[in-house]
Image (spheres, rainbow, N blue to C red):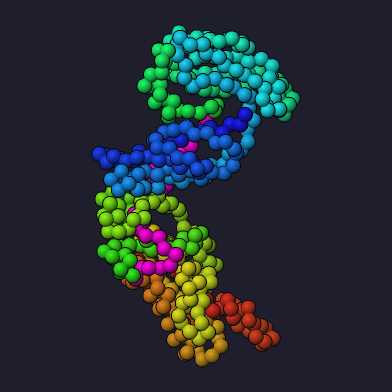
Amino acid sequence: SELLCYEFFEEATLNADSVAMIYEWDFGDGTKERALETYHCYETAGIYIVELNIMDPMIGKTFVNEAIYELEIEEVLQPVIICPDTISMKADFLVKVEQGKWEKFQIGNYYIDYGDSVIIKNEKNTYSYKSDGFKELKILISGYDKSSESIVTKCFYKNVFVTSEVTSLAVQDKFLEELNYEGFNSDKINEHVPGEAYYSLEILNSPSSVLNDTNQLKEFTSRVIEIFDSSSSTYSYVLGKTNNPFDMIDEFRAAHKAGFINAIVKSIKNESFGFEGLGMVYDNESGEVNIVLNNIHFEFNGYQLDEKSKVELGTLIQYLSTNTNVRIEIGAHTDDVGNNRYNLKLSQKRATNVINYISLQGIEMTRLKAKGYGESQPLVPNNLPDGSDHPEGRAKNRRVTFKILSN
């Protein structure tokens, strides 16, 4: 028998006050359960995407996707231990211990600790509890471990609920409903660590940018931030930032009332930012740190951004949205083909077009500066030592960079 049962619980202290919410677990195997704490057993090993969603009964939809967790279950062989979860004091309690598929461990002897000061070796008979309540059943097994080639002992646990009546009690039914599993050594899955994320209200998710579509975003236009998700190639429009998602319940309901039927509060990771994720980092002669943005392209002798370049700018925009006190300069550079004066004007137009696009995504223009450098700051020579053309060098010199400005 495989160890495929887990306990799921929400550890974060979310203050819902008087707001009545429904907690729903999606276990990633096609089953769901509504409970704050629950047990669930998987039929097979594998990787499961587990979600905890908090439902708003007033709207009838998910209010916040509190946690998403990738649960990887490996095949772990153990002995077959069969016993009921709930038993009456007046009933015969039978625990069966069998070898099963536990091939690497040969069972010798075992001891059953019934959780009420009674321990019996190699029990083959039934047992009757003398008191009711929750009991922690322990099965201590000793035997030959083929991996270590030695005699070792292993312990397995299970909670048993003992009732005082023969007939099933209401509390027993509730317990069976919430704790219906046949696993041992259940692992706790902590789905959320406070302080490692913040919450925002996503009012819309779109495959293309709609930031300037006032008909789509309606009254939220002035407050919304566009976030590009490179993994799904979609644009997410969010507003607000809080550590307690219930602070956004009124805005969540207002968004649904305004027609955003897929609005949801999302947990957003507040990860540290690495410049190397945006492109090559280099220091120029003055000691300034510049970052060459990846894959920012323009038409030949043109200054309009193509769609792929807009996608690449998504990461920089996310950084600026998270770090609201940062000011940057966007610099555009060319190679030395053509007139220097023309290259200077062309690069200024390119830099200006980049900051105009960034500004349209919700970043204040006062935080952005455009600077065209033309051919004045090559990274590498445009020509080889013998005077012949150096195409690879020219490609490196045609670039868009950014640097952080002092406030």
Q: How many marks are shown on the rendered structure?
A: 0
- Residue 395 image position (x, y, % from top left): 58, 78
- Pick the residue in front: 355 or 204: 204
Q: Residue at x 58, y 18 (%)?
A: 139
Q: Residue at x 66, y 25 (%)?
A: 100
- Residue 264 image position (x, y, % from top left): 36, 52
Residue 394 in the figure: left or right of residue 245: right
- Pick the residue in front: 14 or 51: 51
Q: Is 190 situated above or below 274?
A: above
Query: Is 186 inside the magenta-drawn segment?
Result: yes
Q: Quadrant of the C terminus?
A: bottom left
Q: Residue at x 36, y 21 (%)?
A: 170
Q: Residue at x 62, y 19 (%)?
A: 97
Query: Is 196 inside the magenta-drawn segment?
Result: yes
The image quadrant that residue 52 belongs to is top left
- Residue 185 image position (x, y, % from top left): 54, 27
Residue 210 in the figure: left or right of residue 290: left
Magenta residues? 185-212
